[in-house]
Image (cartoon, grey):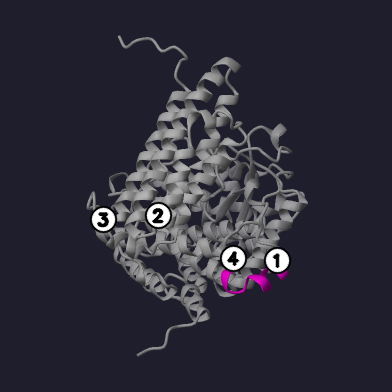
Amino acid sequence: MNEPRTLDEIEAAMALNVPFGDWRYINDRSVLFYTRRLELLVRRLPEVEPLLAAWNAASPEARYPVLGDTVLRATLNAALGGLENGVQDLPLERYRAVFEDARRLLAEGRREAPTERGASRRLRVGDAAHHPWVWCDEREEDVWAQGFRQLFDQEKSRSLLRTPDEASLGVLRGAVALLEDVLPQVSRSVLDHAYLIGVTDVLNRRDWDNPKRRFSYDSFTTFTIPGALFLSMGMLRNPYKAAESLLHESLHLKLHDVQHTHAILKRGYNSDRSPVIRSLWNRWHPEATNEWPACRSLAAMHVYVHLALYAERLARDPERIQAVHGPLNGYDPVLQKRRSLERAYFLGGALRRECWEELGIGGQRMVDWMMGLLNELGAGHLPQDGNAHLFLDLYEREAKDFNVLLEGLREMPEAVSAERGQGLRRAVSEMLRDELGVAVRIAATLGDATASASLREQAERISTSRLSEVTDAELPRFLNSTRGTVASLLRAVPAERLVGMREVQSEKPLSELVREMVVTSGTQLNDMAAARFQPRHAAPPG
């Protein structure tokens, strides 16, 4: 019988696997991919041939920053795609300017990213060649800057690019140092695919100094902006969270590069026609659906597998890590590991059941490879249908939506706000009593008489009149406190017991009681949100 692999050995498997991990192999394949695209472009745009010649003659060290440049990649893709598809009015002069500038850099052997050259300051997260550079918004508005801004604006991200201040840049550099400390092999591998970091902020520049401003996202990457990842300023407050986001988005960029040359998805794959997997830990809303097609589910699984190892490493030696990198400040590696393992294992099983035919042979082998890693990291004991803890993640995260409800009430006229506030407190009271009632039933089934009695007493104390004495500032804390009591009870129960034990009265598995509770509460929160926007005195239906 083989001995279990150490964490170092598991990390090496993640970082050096061919074809899914080894950055050298993936980069070699990317060079072949883009060389082929340049050759195809030359057939349609012969004046690009000098760029191809300089490309082939350049050393790997000189070619690396040019190959990875976001604007060059995007321009090459746009030019080739537009010419092959007969698109009219292509900006060929801008394309030619980009290609000629890239040719000159390669011919001169200058080891720098073309888009970075125009920045008024060189901002980098480290000194190594594979360390990404950071966008500086104070810069020369050359074709490279114009190209990058156009790519960013097309995303309609409801945010602005900005130059990070020294404190934020320090957090970002600290995040890289943290990754290289706890995951030296993985960080070397993934950062090789992240060429550029764009830091973003809210649309209203006057709010940039407001520490309570709300961001529309934490971070993102997209196929249409190759080699670049974007982090909101909200992510640059805690190096542990910043490191997680940097790892997360760099892994997406790595997978993008793998997809260029391997059959990860089936031929003719269309995300709009793919079966979907519901990410149970996310709440559905129109701008961020929790129903993911095969491509997004695979990408998320890829991230969660690596985040599980990141959290495991933090949890193994927290004293030493905090002595070097500062306090965790609320970042809980034990909780993050559990969440990452459960989510990755859930997605892997769902991909096999629901989306297997949507994957190419490379994608199927990738899922099998990652499921093996998950088993080594401790996910092998999880039941495939043990999704109760995933619903609990959603249950706890919904407090954010509740804060949004309160913000909306404060923006209303005082009289309307008071009326809606009473209605909201009544709805919250009913919802929390129902949730505590479910927790009482689960505790009784588990034979925990003490917890059952305590929960029943807490439910009896909740009333609309009591909540009317709670201020708007205290209401979220009250909700979180009550939900925390319920979640603490349920999280302490192993997933296999929630699946295997049934309530005598209803004959339902305890996991089903958890699911019903969270779904019902989510519906109630949606109803509260809808009521907030209703006219004060609605007209009768016509």
Q: Earlier in the sequence, mark 4 or mark 1?
A: 4
Tell me, yes or no, whether the two marked residues, 3 and 4, touch with CB atoms within 8 Å.
no
Q: Earlier in the sequence, mark 3 or mark 4?
A: 4
**Residue kind at label 4, given as amino acid type:** Tyr
Q: Which quadrant of the structure image shows residue 416?
A: top right
Q: Position of residue 101 (x, y in %)?
A: 63, 53
Return the residue at label 3. Answer: 354
- In the displayed structure, 64 sits above or below 488; it is below
- Between tags 2 and 4, which lies in front? 2
Asked whether residue 76 is drawn in magenta, I would say no
Tell me, yes or no, whether the two marked residues, 4 and 1, touch with CB atoms within 8 Å.
no
Instruction: State the residue in front, 69 or 398.
Output: 398
- Between tags 3 and 2, which lies in front? 2
Asked whether residue 319 is drawn in magenta, I would say yes
Q: Earlier in the sequence, mark 2 or mark 4?
A: 4
Q: Earlier in the sequence, mark 3 or mark 1?
A: 1
Highlighted magenta segment, given as a residue range: 315-326
Instruction: Residue 390: give its label.
Output: 2
Return the residue at label 1. Answer: 325
**Residue kind at label 3, given as amino acid type:** Glu
Give the residue drawn at x 26%, y 57%. Answer: 502
Give the residue drawn at x 72%, y 44%. Answer: 140
- In the displayed structure, 111 sits above or below 411; it is below
Return the residue at label 4. Answer: 64
Q: What's the magenta bit mostly, secondary-structure-wise?
A: helix
Cα distance in 3D space between marks 3 and 4: 39 Å
SS at circle 3: helix
- Between tags 3 and 4, which lies in front? 3
Q: Earlier in the sequence, mark 1 or mark 2?
A: 1
Q: In this rendering, would 297 be left or right of 312? A: left
